[in-house]
């Protein structure tokens, strides 16, 4: 270690300049993508509650904390009637506090995954109104951008997480007044100064969370990112890796029809008894039936993780015909550590205070990214325009399309979930329709931002217009919920339906913030338009920006 570090002297100017360059370019290149990932991750903290809002038939249901009144075997009968014969996987989700319905689903064999909800008290199949946009749109977008081909989306998300870590480390290295920045926020100053203050405050406030969420995000898909090493060690035998490292069990199909099916309820009770004997109290989280029509069908019974952080499910594998235990999951220490870290990232355990803290910290991360991009643009706008460069305008357009456009797309998907009619005869189910609405709205916002920033630069960036659209859409979503289901805010609060009420309250908060931001940015744009050519004089006592 050099004398400079042992004596506590500040880093050399060259080192600080290098770290500043890393921080700047990591932010410029990945800011819009990181904002999208952070926003969708923040919404995914309450993905199941968003599903209940977007699917009105699933709201007024009794919780299933003591188990469903309808047996899992009865749900299997519904699956036999609903699932296509080509489906290779059946799914059964017993009700829980956050999902009070008994959910069934199917996938595989070239069949698109579908989920249906049953009344946990009566077994009645609920109408397929609305779409699970929280769990099936916002959450997958968070980690894959819905780009499934060759896992490209997950690789891009991994690159963004790496850039986030680089930005955090380099940002700490460049800050000489880290503690002071935490208490310095001057919203009345110029937009450039106020944005930089807000960026610093939220960065320091959420520093441990940002490191945790970026690093754990990489660990979630460690087996994907380390795939070349896995292929080299196991010689391309992926199944051997799954069995040895992840303690999974599979067996080839017998290609003979399944003669008799053992009771799923009995297998679930057997798994619960085994968990209790091991001192691990817990309920069944999901039952998966592999190759449900084949004589070699396997039933996987997985624990829920409401009461613990780790996502180790202690899966038990049974023969679907005889009910014999085939395999009990025994994870290696490394895999158990990874499941614990995944649990920290996904926060699926039952701790509402911590869940809200994750939501607040995620929102602070969104503000940090947006404020940093705005500060970068404001610092370089005039110089780039004077030199004929388009860099600042392009970054501003991408930032606007992310900061305003992505929330517009999310709220549009929520509105579409309530508005778009659907029946079994339609070619496109509700989720596909809501997804198309989401991407159409987002692309429209991106096109509008690029048009305003690059083609019509005299009109400035589209902050005002898109902020107004977001505020109007959020209010519209609250009204649509009332109109389509009769569940206005006072009614949901009165009956204790906090999932629906909090989504409505969140939409009202988004409308207020968007209106306020639009006004603030309009005021800043008016001031910038009056700025003299020689440059804008600093207010008394205002420090120059770095």
Image (tube, rainbow, N blue to C red):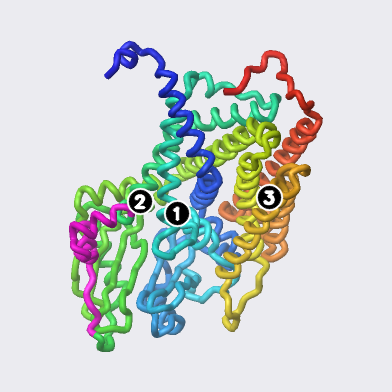
Residue tagged 1: 143
Name the residue at 44% across, 23% down. Answer: 16
Give the side of residue 332 with respect to residue 161, left or right. left
Residue tagged 3: 449
Q: Quick check: marks 3 and 2 in contact, CB under 8 Å?
A: no
Residue tagged 2: 220
Could you tell me residue 183's position as x and y percent? 56, 21
- Relative depth, front residue between 224 and 308: 224
Q: Quick check: marks 1 and 2 in contact, CB under 8 Å?
A: yes
Name the residue at 29% across, 82% down. Answer: 261
Ranked by sequence position, the earlier of labels 1 and 3 is 1
In the picture shown, does residue 322 fall above or below 435? below
Could you tell me residue 132's position as x and y percent? 53, 64
Where, quadrant-wise, is the N terminus in this rendering?
Answer: top left
C-alpha distance separating marks 1 and 3: 25 Å
Ranked by sequence position, the earlier of labels 1 and 2 is 1
Ranked by sequence position, the earlier of labels 3 and 2 is 2
In the picture shown, does residue 326 fall above or below 487? below
Could you tell me residue 375's position as x and y percent? 61, 32
Number of residues whose C-alpha sits closer than 10 Å to that of mark 1, classed few (under 14), some (14–19) or many (20 or more): many
Q: Is residue 262 visible?
A: yes
Q: Is residue 340 magenta?
A: no
- Relative depth, front residue between 474 and 76: 474
Q: Quadrant of residue 442?
A: bottom right
Magenta region: which residues?
225-254
Secondary structure predominantly adopted by residues drawn in magenta: helix
Q: Which mark is residue 509?
A: none
Where, quadrant-wise, is the C terminus in this rendering?
Answer: top right
């Amino acid at each position: 270690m050099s004398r400079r570090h042992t004596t506590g002297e500040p880093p050399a100017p060259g080192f600080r300049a290098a770290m500043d360059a890393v921080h700047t370019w990591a932010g410029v290149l990945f800011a819009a993508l990181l904002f999208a990932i952070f926003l969708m991750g923040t919404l995914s903290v309450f993905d199941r509650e968003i599903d209940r809002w977007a699917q009105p038939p699933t709201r007024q249901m009794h919780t299933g904390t003591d188990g469903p009144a309808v047996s899992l075997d009865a749900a299997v009968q519904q699956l036999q009637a609903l699932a296509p014969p080509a489906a290779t996987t059946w799914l059964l989700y017993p009700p829980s506090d956050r999902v009070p319905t008994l959910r069934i689903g199917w996938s595989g064999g070239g069949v698109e995954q579908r989920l249906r909800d049953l009344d946990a008290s009566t077994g009645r199949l609920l109408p397929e109104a609305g779409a699970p946009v929280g769990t099936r749109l916002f959450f997958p977008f968070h980690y894959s951008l819905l780009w499934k081909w060759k896992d490209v989306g997950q690789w891009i998300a991994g690159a963004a997480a790496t850039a986030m870590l680089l930005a955090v480390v380099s940002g700490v290295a460049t800050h000489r007044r880290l503690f002071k920045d935490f208490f310095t926020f001057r919203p009345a100053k110029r937009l450039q100064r106020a944005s930089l203050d807000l960026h610093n405050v939220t960065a320091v406030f959420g520093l441990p969370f940002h490191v945790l969420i970026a690093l754990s995000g990489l660990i979630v898909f460690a087996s994907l990112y380390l795939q070349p090493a896995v292929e080299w060690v196991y010689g391309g035998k992926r199944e051997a890796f799954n069995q040895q490292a992840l303690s999974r069990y599979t067996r080839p199909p017998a290609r003979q029809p399944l003669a008799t099916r053992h009771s799923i309820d009995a297998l679930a009770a057997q798994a619960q008894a085994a968990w209790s004997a091991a001192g691990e109290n817990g309920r069944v989280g999901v039952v998966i039936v592999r190759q449900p029509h084949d004589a070699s069908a396997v039933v996987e019974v997985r624990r829920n993780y409401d009461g613990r952080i780790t996502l180790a499910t202690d899966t038990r594998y049974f023969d679907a015909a005889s009910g014999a235990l085939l395999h009990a999951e025994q994870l290696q220490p490394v895999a158990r550590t990874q499941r614990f870290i995944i649990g920290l990232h996904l926060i699926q355990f039952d701790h509402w205070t911590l869940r809200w803290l994750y939501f607040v910290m995620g929102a602070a991360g969104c503000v940090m990214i947006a404020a940093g991009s705005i500060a970068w643009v404001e610092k370089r706008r005039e110089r780039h325009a004077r030199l004929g460069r388009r860099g600042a305008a392009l970054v501003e357009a991408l930032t606007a399309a992310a900061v305003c456009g992505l929330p517009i797309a999310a709220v549009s998907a929520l509105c579409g979930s309530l508005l778009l009619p659907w029946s079994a005869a339609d070619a496109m189910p509700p989720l596909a329709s809501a997804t198309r609405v989401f991407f159409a709205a987002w692309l429209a916002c991106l096109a509008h931002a690029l048009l305003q920033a690059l083609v019509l630069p005299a009109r400035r960036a589209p902050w005002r217009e898109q902020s107004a659209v977001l505020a109007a859409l959020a209010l519209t979503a609250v009204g649509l919920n009332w109109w389509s289901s009769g569940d206005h805010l006072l009614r949901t609060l009165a009956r204790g339906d906090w999932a629906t009420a909090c989504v409505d309250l969140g939409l009202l908060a988004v409308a207020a913030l968007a209106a306020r931001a639009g006004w603030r940015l309009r005021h800043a744009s008016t001031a910038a338009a009056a700025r003299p050519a020689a440059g804008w004089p600093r207010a008394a006592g205002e420090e120059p920006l770095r």
